[in-house]
Amino acid sequence: MRAETITTDKANEQASSWSSNGEVLPKPVPPSPRPARMRMPWQLKTLLPVAAALLNGLLLFVLLTISLDSGPRHTVIAVATAGAFIICAIIMATLGYFVRKPMLELQKKIARVTQGDLSVSVDFADRNDEIGDLGRDFNSMVLQLRESREEIQRLHRTQMSRAEHLATLGELAAGLAHEIRNPLAGIAGVIDIIGRDLPIESPACAVVKEVKQEAMHINRILTDLLETARPKHPNFRREDLDATISHAIMFAREQATTKQVHIEFLQQKNVRPVEHDPAQIHQVLLNMLLNAIQAVAREGHIVVSLENRGDYAAISITDNGPGIPPDTLKNIFRPFFTTKGHGTGLGLSLARRMVEDHAGRIEVTSKVGEGTTFVVLLPYDRPHSEPAQS
Ligand SMILES: Nc1ncnc2c1ncn2[C@@H]1O[C@H](COP(=O)(O)OP(=O)(O)OP(=O)(O)O)[C@@H](O)[C@H]1O
Ligand SMILES: [Mg+2]
C-alpha cells in the first residue's frame, strides 16, 4: 500500500499560480520591446520597386529609340514618362483605397478594444478577399471576447450574491452560536453541581458525566463556528511548546472516556521556545488529537512528538487508526468536509488557517490500514514577526 502525503504549504502556492482544478497556470509573457529600426512608410515601400521597374523600362526605351529623330523621340519619351507617373499614381490610389483604408480602420478599432470597448466591428468584413477574411476574423474575435466577458461578469455576479448570502448566514450562525454558548455554560454549571451532590454509587453519576461530555462537545462546535465566522488574530508569545502540547493532551485524555486510548508524548530536549498563540495551537492540537481518538479502535495508540526540523519546530501526532483513503485525504482541509455523522468538518480547516497565520504549515501522511500522521510545523522566526507579548 502507498502512503499519500499532502501539505498545506502557502509558500508553494505562491511560487506558482494554481487554477481551481489544480493545474499549473503558465505565467503571462511580457510583450517583447520593438527593435529600434528605421520606420519606412508603406507608400515608399510600394512605390520604390514600381518606380525602379518603370525607370528601367524608360531607359530601355531611350536606348531603343536612339536612332530616331530628336523631335518625335522627345515626344515619345515625354509620353512614356507621363505614363509611368500615371501608373504609379493609379497604383498608389488603388492601394490606398483597398489596403490602407481598412488597415487604418482596423488600427482604430483595435485601439478601442484595448480601451475595453467590445461593441466594435470593422466595416470591410463583407469584402470577398483576404482583407475581408481579416475583417471577419477580427469581428468574430471581438464577439468571442464580448461573450467571454459577459460570462465572466455573470459568474462574478453569481459569486458575489452567493458570498453575500454566505456572509449573512455566517453572521446568523455566529450570532446563534454566541447566544447558545451562554445558556450552555449555565447548564454545564448546574450539571456540575448536581453531579457533585450525587453519591458516588448512584447510577445517575454516569448520566451526569455523559451530559457533561455532550455539553463540552456542543461548546466545541460553537467555538469552531464562531472562530470560522469571526477569525481572531493570534496573540503571539514566545513560549515553550511543551506546555501547550501537554495541555492539549490532558484535555484530549479527558474526552477519551469511552476508549482505552494510550497517548504518549516524546520530547526532544533542544527545541527552542516558539513564538505562538498558546490558545490557538492548543485548539489545533486538540482537534487533531480528538480526530485521532475518534479514528482509532478501542485500544488505540497515539504518539505525540516534538522535535527540531530545520527552521521549524515540528509537532507530530501519529495514530494507529484506519488511515485516510487518498480520495478523502485531498478534501480533509475543506471547510465542512466530514466523514463523521456528528462532525462539523470545521476542525482541520480552522487548524490550517491558524497554523498559516503563524507562518507555518501542516503535513499529513496516511497509509490505509496502518494509521495517520499529522505534522504541525511552526517557524522559530516568523517573517515580519511583531514584537512578542509577554
Ligand atoms: N487521524 C485521522 N484518521 C482518519 N481520518 C481522519 C483523521 N483526522 C481527520 N480525518 C478525516 O478528516 C475529516 C475532517 O476532519 P475535521 O477535524 O476537519 O472534521 P471532523 O473531525 O469530521 O469534525 P469536527 O472536527 O468539526 O468535529 C474527518 O471527518 C475524517 O474523515
Ligand atoms: Mg475534527
Image: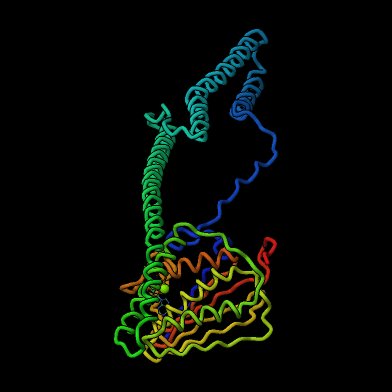
Question: Residue 215 vs residue 351: left or right?
Answer: left
> Is 227 in front, or is 195?
195
The structure residue drawn at horizontal position 61% and vertical position 30%, both measured from the top left corner, is 45
Q: Quadrant of the N terminus?
A: bottom left
The structure residue drawn at horizontal position 57% and vertical position 76%, both measured from the top left corner, is 244
Q: Is residue 266 above or below residue 114?
A: below
> Is 384 in front, or is 145?
384
Q: Is residue 368 visible?
A: no
Q: Residue 58, how many percent across, how many down?
A: 63, 21
Question: Residue 335 vs residue 80: left or right?
Answer: left
Question: Residue 336 vs residue 234: left or right?
Answer: left
The structure residue drawn at horizontal position 65% and vertical position 7%, both measured from the top left corner, is 71
Check the image and tell me how it is coloured.
rainbow
The structure residue drawn at horizontal position 56% and vertical position 18%, both measured from the top left corner, is 89
Q: Residue 162, how many percent across, how many down?
A: 37, 49
Quadrant housing residue 316: bottom right
